[in-house]
Amino acid sequence: MKKYVCGICGYVYDPDKGDPDGGIARGTAFEGLPDDWTCPVCGASKDEFAPE
Amino acid sequence: MKNIYSAVRVTDKVYWVGAIDWGIRDFHGYTTPQGSTYNAYLIMADEVTLIDAVKAPFKEEMLSRIKSVIDLSQIKYIISNHSEMDHSGCLMEVVDLIKPRKVFASAIGVKTLKELYHGQQEIIPVKDGETVSLGNMNLTFMETRMIHWPDSMFTYLAEEELLFSQDAFGMHLATLERFDDELPQSLLEYEAATYYANIVLPYSAIVLKTLGKVASTNWKIKIIAPDHGPIWRKQLGWIIDLYKKWAAQKPTNKAVVLYATMWHSTEKMARAISESLAEAGVKVGLVSMNDFHRSQAAYEVLDAGALILGSSTLNNNMLPQMADVTTYLRGLKPANLIGAAFGSFGWSGEGVRDLEAVLKEMKVEIAAPSVSVRNAPNEGALKICYDLGKTIAAELRKRMGAN
C-alpha cells in the first residue's frame, strides 16, 4: 500500500500506521479513508494528498 | 533630523532593519500587552539582500532603517521566509520601489504571496536544502512547513553562522533593546512561552522534528534572528531547550482551573478545587475567564498536566466566555492532559455537560466525575469539589511517576 503526502504541510499518511487519533485503524489504505478524513497536522482535505 | 530610524548592527555584515509596533494589543485574537516588533534584516553581501519585510503601515520605518546603511537601489535580492501579512504586508510595494533582481520564497510561499496580493511580480520558488550565492556569502533554505504556516522556511547564512528563523523563537515584545542579553531572562521566558502557547503549540510534533533536522545539518549557529522580538546571541541553547520542553508536552505536576461564573457559585467551586490541589502539592493556574484573556489561558495550559473546566449555565449553554476559550484551546491542541468539569446552574445545568464534551473532543482524559451544583454550593458540595482536587492530584502524581 502506498504512502501519501499532504501537499500543504508535508505530513505523510502511512497505511501501516493508520491515523489512530483520527480513528483510522492500521492497515487502512489511503483509498479506503473516509471522504471527510482530514490531515491530522493541518486539516487539509484528502484531495490535497498525492502519492509519495 | 530627517531620519529618526537607524539600522542596528547584528554582525559585521548583517543589520536589523525592522519596525517596532508599540501599540498593537490584538494579534488575531492573541492579546499582546507589550506590543511587538516586525524584524527585517539586511545582509551586506556582494548581492545585498533583504530578509523579510514588515507589516504594511510600518513600511517607511523599515525603509528609513535600510537607508541609514545603504541606498535602496543597492538591494539585489529579497527573501520572504514567511508570507503572513505582518512580514509581507508591504513586500510587493517594496519590490516595486526597489526593483531587486530576484525575490525568493518557498514554493508554497510563492503561491501564498500570489493569492494574498495578486501581483505580477516574479517570485522564484526555492527548494528545501537549496543554496543561493550572494557572491561572497551563501544562503541555504530549509522548509519548516507548519511552523507555523505551510509556507514557512528558515534561511541560514553560513558565513555569519546566523539562522533567520522567521516566527520560530519569536515573541511579541516591543523594546528598543534588540538582543536577548539586554533583557531580563524571566521576561524572555514569559513572552517566549506565551508566544509558543498561542502560535506554535499545535505544531509541537513538527517542532521536535525540525529541531532534529537542523541538528543533522551540522550548521554552526551563533545567532538566531527571528521575525518578532529580540535576537538570540547569548542564550541559544536555553531557548532551544525550552522549545524542546514545550513541544514534548510531558505530564507535569500542574493543574489549570479555568472557569467563568455568573454569581460567584462556580467561582467558589473553582477556589475549593484550587485550594485542594495546592494542598496536595500541585502547582495551580487559576484563570477566571470573567477577568482574563484567552491568551493567558493558553499560556497557563502550556506546561500543565491537568485542565479542569468550570462554567455556570446560561440559557441552556455554557457561558460564552468558556465557549470562546475552549474553541481557542481546542485549536491549539494541547496534549497529554487529564481533566474534569464543574459548575453551578439554576434549573437545567447544560454548562457542565458542554464542558465534558469539549474535554472529550480535546482528547483530555477525564480523571474525575463532573461536579454539578444547583444554585450556590453548600458545605457538602464544596467538599465534593475539594475531593475532585484530591483525585486529580493523585492522578497527576501517578502520571508523573510513570514518566
Image (tube, grey):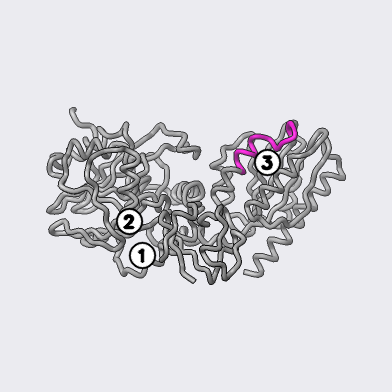
Residue behind mark 2: B154
Q: CA distance from mark 3 to mark 2?
A: 39 Å
> Which chain does the numbered disc 2 sit on?
B
Of residues B151 and B252, the one nearer the viewer is B151
Q: Amino acid at mark 1?
A: Val
- Up-down: is A42 above or below B120? below
Q: Is residue B319 magenta?
A: yes
Mark 1 secondary-structure assignment: helix
Q: State if disc 1 and disc 2 touch (CB < 8 Å).
A: yes
Q: Residues within 10 Å of mark 1 (few under 14, many from 20)?
A: some
Q: Amino acid at mark 2?
A: Phe
Looking at the rendering, in which quadrant would you find the N terminus of chain B? Answer: top left
Q: Which mark is residue B214?
A: 1
| Nearer-N-terminus badge (1/3) | 1
Q: Which image quarter is the C terminus of chain B in?
A: bottom right
Residue projecting furthest to the top:
B1
Question: Which percent across, then down, holds residue B64?
Answer: 21, 35
